[in-house]
Image: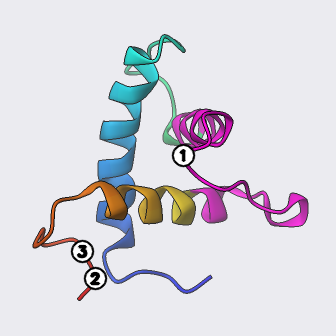
């Protein structure tokens, strides 16, 4: 998977928005002490379960690939002209 220019910022935004979705969906609430790794995995799995993103292949199921999928997901959610959107 080709890394996006602003992938780190997109992942950060995906965690913020994903945490809100996670809570509103009734899946739970993240604590300040929860690691980013746990948040990434939980948000990714919920989005897959809800059919909002395609699951990774079994042999590709790693944290860097989950981050990439979350970055792609949030990029599609951002409004046109947002500075993090690829041109």
For the residue carrying disc 3, how many other residues have a C-alpha within 10 Å: few (<14), some (14-19), or many (20+)?
Answer: some
Task: Please identify the dominant SS of the magenta region.
Answer: helix
Q: Cβ–Cβ below 8 Å for labels 1 and 3? A: no
The local secondary structure at tag 3 comes to: loop
Of pointers 2 and 1, the one earlier in the residue sequence: 1
For the residue carrying disc 1, how many other residues have a C-alpha within 10 Å: few (<14), some (14-19), or many (20+)?
Answer: few
Say the numbered circle drawn on residue 86.
2
Say the numbered circle drawn on residue 8.
none
For the residue carrying disc 2, how many other residues have a C-alpha within 10 Å: few (<14), some (14-19), or many (20+)?
Answer: few
Q: Cβ–Cβ below 8 Å for labels 3 and 2? A: yes
Point out the stretch of residues depicted in magenta. 38-66
Q: Is residue 60 magenta?
A: yes
Q: Is residue 71 above or below residue 24?
A: below
Q: Residue at x 30, y 54 (%)?
A: 77
Q: Measured from the top left, where is residue 21 in percent x and y?
A: 39, 28
Of pointers 1 and 3, the one earlier in the residue sequence: 1
Q: Which residue is denoted by mark 3 in the rendering? A: 85
Q: Is residue 15 above or below residue 9?
A: above
In this rendering, position of residue 33 left or right of residue 65: left
Q: Cβ–Cβ below 8 Å for labels 2 and 1? A: no
Q: Measured from the top left, where is residue 56 in percent x and y?
A: 75, 60
Distance in Å between CA atoms under marks 3 and 2: 4 Å
Q: Which residue is denoted by mark 1 in the rendering? A: 52
Image quadrant holding the C terminus, namely bottom left
Q: Is residue 79 above or below residue 85?
A: above
In this rendering, position of residue 30 left or right of residue 52: left
Q: Is residue 47 magenta?
A: yes
């Amino acid at each position: 998977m080709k890394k996006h220019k602003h992938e780190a910022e997109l992942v950060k935004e995906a965690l913020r928005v994903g945490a809100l979705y996670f809570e509103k969906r009734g899946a739970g609430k993240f604590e300040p002490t929860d690691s980013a790794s746990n948040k990434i995995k939980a948000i990714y799995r919920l989005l897959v379960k809800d059919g909002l993103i395609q699951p990774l292949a079994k042999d590709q199921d790693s944290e860097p690939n989950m981050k990439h999928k979350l970055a792609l997901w949030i990029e599609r959610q951002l409004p046109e002209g947002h500075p993090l959107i690829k041109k």
